[in-house]
Image (cartoon, helix red, strand yellow):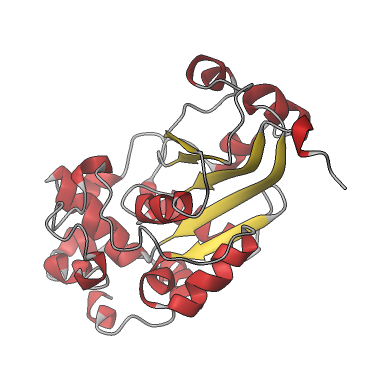
Amino acid sequence: MIDKLNYTNECEIRVVALVRSGHHAIINWITKHFENSVFLNNPDVGYDWFSKNIDKTKAKGLLIYNYERHLYTLKQICEGNSVEARDEAVGKSLRRYDCLVLRDPFNTFASKIRVTGAKPNSINGKDLNMCEIWKEHAREFLGKTDYLMEPKVFINYNKWFVDERYRRITMNLFGAKLTDDGKETVPNYGNGSSFDGLSFNGRASEMDVTNRWRHYADDDEFRQLFDAEMVELSERIFGHIEGTERLF
């Protein structure tokens, strides 16, 4: 039997996602299933950041942190990813997971464009392209690459949003029983939903999160974001999203 006294964190979850992928709602939902949860939002890549922002000696039921910037590839996030390095950065963890949250590209990009108020091509940076990072995350999701540490937990946001059984199975992977506390909360990170703000807080399931793309369906620049590889990856993970064929 493992002596829990030798561990700082009973459970540690590192989340990787793109902005506007729904991962803050999922993170909030996860934290409600653990006592004494600590969440660190969007740390810098590299372990030096943690020494300035966390007490690695303080016992925690859950330590959860997320990388959401499209400035970094999965390879950059995971470089130097030994167990010893993570122990040194955040303390030893009894259970440790790498979690990748993915939302379909049509609604992810529509939400990103909505919140920035910019043209669709603004989601592509000078060095790293948000579209390319989405495809990189999708390839990892499908097992085409192997950057994240085991055990890996992949969460399909579209399915998580509507399917209680899927949420139950996902929570079991983290060693907890589903209560669904926090499922209806709209987190305040990034001022809430791109389209609805915090107006649906307490009844998040009423938001129309799978049809955000329709707001830009007639925008040529928006339609040009989706190449053949992205469409194929999306359909393998999310299935066909009704109506999106008009984009191609």
Q: Is residue 90 left or right of residue 114?
A: right
56 vs 82: above or below: above
Q: Residue 25 occupies which quadrant of the picture?
A: bottom left
Q: Residue at x 44, y 52 (%)?
A: 32
Q: Position of residue 78 (x, y in %)?
A: 63, 38
123 vs 92: above or below: below
Observer-nearest residue: 88 or 248?
88
Q: Residue 10 occupies which quadrant of the picture?
A: top right
Observer-nearest residue: 165 or 1?
1
Q: Is residue 46 left or right of residue 241?
A: right
Q: Residue at x 77, y 28 (%)?
A: 84
The quadrant of the picture occupied by the C terminus is bottom left
Observer-nearest residue: 234 or 198?
198
Farthest right residue in view: 1
Q: Position of residue 74 (x, y in %)?
A: 56, 43
Observer-nearest residue: 160 or 225?
160
Q: Position of residue 93 (x, y in %)?
A: 70, 37
Q: Residue at x 21, y 49 (%)?
A: 192
Badge count = 0
Q: Residue 21 occupies which quadrant of the picture?
A: bottom left
Q: Is residue 207 left or right of residue 28?
A: left
Q: Is residue 120 visible?
A: no
Q: Is residue 152 visible?
A: yes
Q: Residue at x 31, y 52 (%)?
A: 20
95 vs 220: above or below: above
